[in-house]
Image (tube, rainbow, N blue to C red):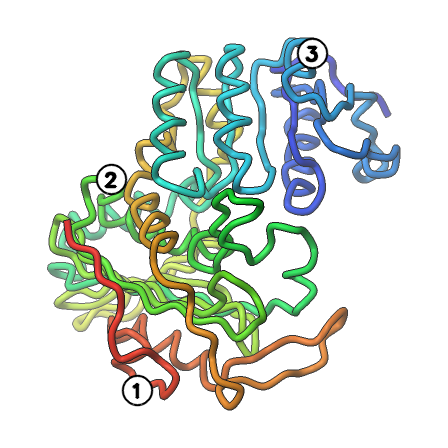
């Protein structure tokens, strides 16, 4: 079966690993005639098998490890960048300098200085950049904000986020940058809070209307690592927004069992639970029965195309990740995550490699979201009694 020739020409940088998700999404949008995969930037070209989906071929997009040359030769209008964190700013600015608009995978950048450099380059070039926090495309986000505005659960007393995932030791050996704070002198900051479960942070901030850099008043983190890595695999964040909303985010990659991450919005007369990967919302009020709804989602690449055509507002412009980047910077400059003592975790065989499980962490993550407390406040014996605190 052939593929449509119509659609916005797109170059994908990074088509393996998580890039496979973007490749499948491009396949879907190409079949709909919205985009055309014009090029793929990879160190090793993709095989014919890798370039097909459900028996349908992408055709033969040009492949090269020369990103700048690929953009110019293909006439790309959009670049989707799904590459190691420490390459984000450089590649995005390479595209921007050529007038190519960008879908940039999260996190936006590995440091606040790189984030500011990216903003300056985008402003100078006039190109559009969308940051790949897919959860912010969920229609549930605005639905929850409307519920809060309508006083359905009363005044908001705080937002808690919980993320408990399982990752084995091979997760940290899959790439040289995995689990690193730096690589060859460059910031990476590949920790649980800033990369795999970063959506929990960004979504909580968006729901509170506190996603810009100036919206963070205070923050503290308790960072730990059971695995033999530089970055954190088990962390609790607490912040206060400029609106005075307390927000906690408790996340781990060392859970006993993977669970769907969620947010808890605590109100004076009820609460809202939001499972953001499934766009599912549960409203519980003191005077009424529970109500559960499932919402739609706008794909961020589709939104970028619609924005360029003047049909939609951009959902995740870089400046609306400024508060998240304040958190990334705090994590980057904090002391090394504390290595958990051997008695705090145990190892189990996994499908591909052993995995480390922090004792009781599944319950601690849930309790943090439920009580807006940190690990140390919940009495975890391995948690630090004090945390590094930032105050604006």
Mark 2 surroundings: few (<14), some (14-19) or many (≥20) residues within 10 A: some
Instruction: Give the Cα distance between marks 2 and 1.
Output: 32 Å
Residue 212 disc label: none
User: Is tag 3's residue or tag 1's residue first in the polypeptide sequence?
Assistant: 3
Q: Give the residue displayed 20% in from the left and 68% down from the top.
A: 270
Circle 3 is placed at which residue position?
74
Mark 1 or mark 2, which is nearer the start of the sequence?
2
Which of the image's four quarters has the N terminus? top right
Q: Secondary structure at mark 1?
A: loop
Q: Nearer the viewer, residue 44 or 26?
A: 44
Identify the residue position indicated by label 2 in the image: 213
Q: Secondary structure at mark 3?
A: helix
* Residue 370 x %, y %: 29, 74
Answer whether residue 220 is visible to the viewer in this image: yes
Judge from the rendering whether residue 288 lies leftward or rightward of residue 319; answer left or right. Answer: left
The relative height of residue 343 versus residue 140 in the rendered view (above or below) is: below
Q: Earlier in the sequence, mark 2 or mark 3?
A: 3
**Residue 291 seen in this snapshot:** no
Residue 322 found in image quarter: top left
The residue where tag 1 is placed is 379
Graded by Cα atoms within 10 Å as few (under 14), some (14 to 19) or many (20 or more), the crowding at tag 3 reads: some
Q: Are marks 3 and 1 in contact (CB under 8 Å)?
A: no
């Amino acid at each position: 079966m052939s593929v449509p020739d119509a659609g916005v020409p797109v170059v994908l940088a990074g088509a393996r690993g998580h890039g496979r998700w973007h490749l499948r999404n491009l396949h879907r949008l190409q079949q709909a005639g919205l985009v055309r995969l014009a090029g793929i930037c990879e160190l090793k070209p993709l095989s014919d098998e890798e370039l097909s989906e459900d028996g349908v071929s992408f055709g033969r997009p040009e492949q090269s490890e020369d990103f700048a040359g690929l953009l110019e030769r293909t006439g790309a209008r959009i670049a989707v960048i799904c590459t190691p964190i420490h390459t984000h700013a450089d590649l995005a600015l390479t595209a921007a300098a050529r007038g190519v608009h960008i879908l940039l995978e999260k996190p936006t950048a590995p440091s606040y200085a790189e984030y500011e450099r990216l903003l300056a380059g985008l402003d100078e070039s006039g190109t559009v950049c969308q940051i790949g926090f897919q959860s912010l495309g969920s229609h549930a986000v605005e639905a929850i904000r409307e519920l809060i505005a309508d006083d359905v659960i009363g005044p908001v007393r705080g937002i808690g986020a919980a993320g408990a995932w399982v990752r084995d030791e091979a997760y940290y050996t899959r790439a040289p940058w995995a689990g690193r704070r730096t690589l060859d002198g460059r910031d990476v900051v590949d920790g649980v809070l800033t990369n795999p479960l970063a959506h929990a942070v960004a979504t909580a901030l968006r729901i509170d209307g506190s996603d810009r850099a100036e919206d963070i008043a205070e923050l503290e983190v308790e960072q730990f690592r059971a695995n033999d890595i530089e970055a954190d695999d088990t962390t609790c964040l607490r912040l206060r927004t400029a609106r005075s909303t307390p927000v906690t985010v408790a996340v781990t990659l060392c859970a006993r069992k993977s669970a769907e991450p969620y947010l808890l919005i605590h109100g004076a007369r009820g609460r809202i639970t939001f499972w953001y990967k499934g766009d599912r919302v549960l409203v519980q009020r003191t005077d009424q029965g529970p109500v559960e709804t499932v919402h739609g989602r706008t794909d961020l690449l589709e939104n970028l195309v619609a924005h360029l055509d003047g049909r939609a507002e951009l959902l995740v412009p870089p400046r609306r990740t400024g508060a998240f980047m304040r958190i990334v910077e705090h994590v980057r400059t904090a002391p090394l995550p504390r290595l958990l003592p051997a008695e705090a975790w145990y190892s189990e065989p996994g499908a591909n490699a052993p995995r480390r499980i922090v004792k009781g962490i599944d319950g601690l993550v849930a309790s943090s979201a439920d009580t807006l407390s940190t690990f140390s406040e919940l009495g975890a014996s391995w948690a630090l009694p004090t945390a590094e605190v930032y105050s604006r």
